[in-house]
Amino acid sequence: MYRKKTLEKKVASLQSSLFSRGLPVSRDWIRTKILATPKCTYCGQLIEIQSYSADHIIPLNRKGKNIEANIQLIDVGCNRMKNDLTDEEFRALMGFLSEYPEMYKNVRARLRAGGGFIHGYNKRFVRND
Ligand SMILES: [Zn+2]
């Protein structure tokens, strides 16, 4: 459990970092999320406050809204893997992959590397951000 002062400092720091990237989340929202779910909703890994990554449950380019109700805090690796998938699609993909343990590790590593592994394979899918 975090000491109160430490928690507030980290919450403020995370909030200003997210806000500067256009994510309209309040300190109350962050504090509530962190205290309720200190683990990544997808992989269950404990997340340090500074390692939280904000994800749009329904991506903005899939008509998701940039509001607190559509934002979740997950770990960086899962956020990279989820990329532009919706929460439902990402859970389905992970469920599917878990049926193939040998393939899972390889695909997971590639997804965690983000779009980079596709670079040079098919330039249409290279992200520009
Ligand atoms: Zn995760």
Image: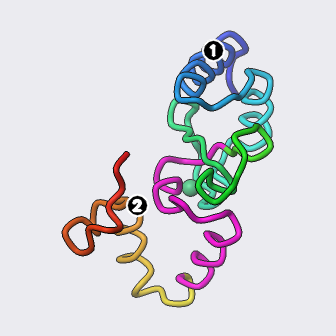
Q: Report the front residue among 120 and 108.
A: 120
Residue 6 is marked as 1
Query: Which is nearer the N-term, disc 2 or disc 1?
Result: 1
Q: Residue at x 29, y 69 (%)?
A: 118
10 Å neighbourhood of mark 1: few (<14), some, or many (≥20)?
few
Q: Report the front residue among 6 and 87.
A: 87
Looking at the rendering, the stretch of residues picked out in magenta corresponds to: 73-97
Q: Residue at x 64, y 72 (%)?
A: 89
Please name the residue that numbered disc 2 is placed on: 112
Q: Is residue 104 above or below residue 8?
A: below
Residue type (three-letter) at the residue carrying disc 2: Arg
* Left or right relative to 28: residue 129: left
Report x, y in % for residue 128.
34, 50
Tell me the quadrant of the picture where the C terminus can be found: top left
For the stretch drawn in magenta, the main secondary structure is helix
Residue type (three-letter) at the residue carrying disc 1: Thr
* Left or right relative to 105: residue 1: right
